[in-house]
Image (tube, helix red, strand yellow):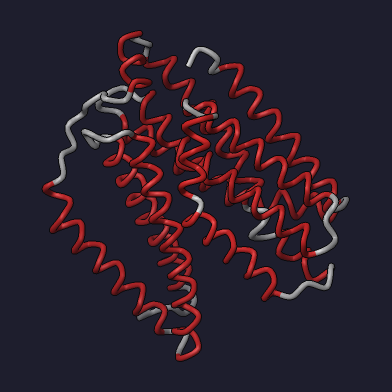
Amino acid sequence: MYHGWPAYAVLLVVLGLGTGIVVISINSFAASMSGYDHRYVFNSIYLGLNVGVAVGTSIAGFIADINITLIFAANLLLYIAFLAIVLFFYKDLAVVHHPDHPEETKRIKTGRRSQKQFMNVLVICALYLVIWIGYVQWQSNIAARLPELHMSMEQYSFLWTINAVLIVIGQPLISQIIKKAARTYKAQINIGVISFILSFVVLMFSVQYAGFLVAIVLLTLGEMLAFPAIPAMISTIAPTGQKGAYQSFVNMSSTIGRAIGPVIGGIIVERSSYTYLYIVIIILMGLSVFIFHYLLKSI
C-alpha cells in the first residue's frame, strides 16, 4: 500500500528479513523430515523454487502491463496463500529425526566433534558463496554485455526461459547422472562446479548468441547438480538439534554472494575486461572446489 520513498526501502529490508526466515525455516524443516532421502527433499524444494520463478516472472509481465502497483497486491495474495498452506498442511508432517540416509548414518557412527562439523560446513558454504559470485554475473554484468554484442533483451530473457525449462524437463537426466557418476554429495557438487567453470570457459570465446546458449545450458546443468546438493550435504553433517542453525549459513552464503558478486564483477569489467572477469571467476571456482575436495576428503 505504501511503496514510495523511503517506505519502499524500509519495507524491502523487512521483506528480506522475512524471506530469510522463511527460506531457513523451510530448509531446516526439510532437514528434519523423516522417511525421505535428503537429496530428494532438497531437490524437490529447488525444483519448486525454479518453477515458481518461471511462472511468477511470466505472470508479473501481464500484471505490470495492466498496472505496476498490482504486483504488490499479487505478492500479498501469494504470501497469504503460502501462510494458509503452512497452517493447514505443515502441522501434520512428521519431522522426527531419522538418519535413514547412508551418508548420515555413517557420519553419526563416526561421532565427529561439533567443531569439525562446523569447519566442514564453513568450507562448503565458502564454496557456495564463490558459486553465487559467479552465478550472479549472469543476472548483472553479463546482462549488460549483450547489448555491446548487438543482442536484444528479448534474447537475454530467452536464455533464462531455457534455464527454467531445462530445470523442469532435465530432472530425469540429473537422476541418471547422480545414479551413475555422482552417488555422493561431494561428487555431485564437484561435477556441478566443473559445469559452472565450463560455462565461463565458453563465455570467454563467445561473441555470437549460440555461444551464450551453450553457456546457459552448462550453467543450468551446474546449478541443477550443486544447488540442491549443498544444503542436503550440510543437513547430513549438522548435529541433531542444530540443523536449523547450520542451514542458516547456507542462506547467508548465497545472500552474500548475490550482494558482492555484481560489485566485484563491475569493478573487474570497468578496470579491465569481460575476459578477465571470466578468468577470475574460473580461478576462484577452481581453487574453491579444489579446497573443498581436499579438506573434505574423508567425507
Name the residue: 59% across, 38% down. Answer: 192
**Foreground pick, 192 / 274:** 192
Is residue 27 found left or right of 13 in the rendered image?
left
Name the residue: 38% across, 21% down. Answer: 103
Is residue 192 found left or right of 27 in the rendered image?
right
**Foreground pick, 84 / 168:** 168
Where the N terminus falls, by quadrant?
bottom left
Position of 16 relative to 194 (above/below):
below
The extreme top residue here reads: 110
Is residue 110 found left or right of 268 in the rendered image?
left
Expressed as whole percent of the image width and height from the top left, the position of residue 109 reads 31, 10
Name the residue: 25% across, 27% down. Answer: 241
Expressed as whole percent of the image width and height from the top left, the position of residue 112 reads 37, 11
- Quadrant assignment, res 211: bottom right
Name the residue: 48% across, 21% down. Answer: 120
Position of 232 relative to 136 (above/below):
above
Position of 9 relative to 194 (above/below):
below
Q: How many marks?
A: 0
Expressed as whole percent of the image width and height from the top left, the position of residue 163 reads 57, 59
**Foreground pick, 190 / 124:** 190
Position of 291 relative to 274 (above/below):
above
The extreme right residue here reads: 272
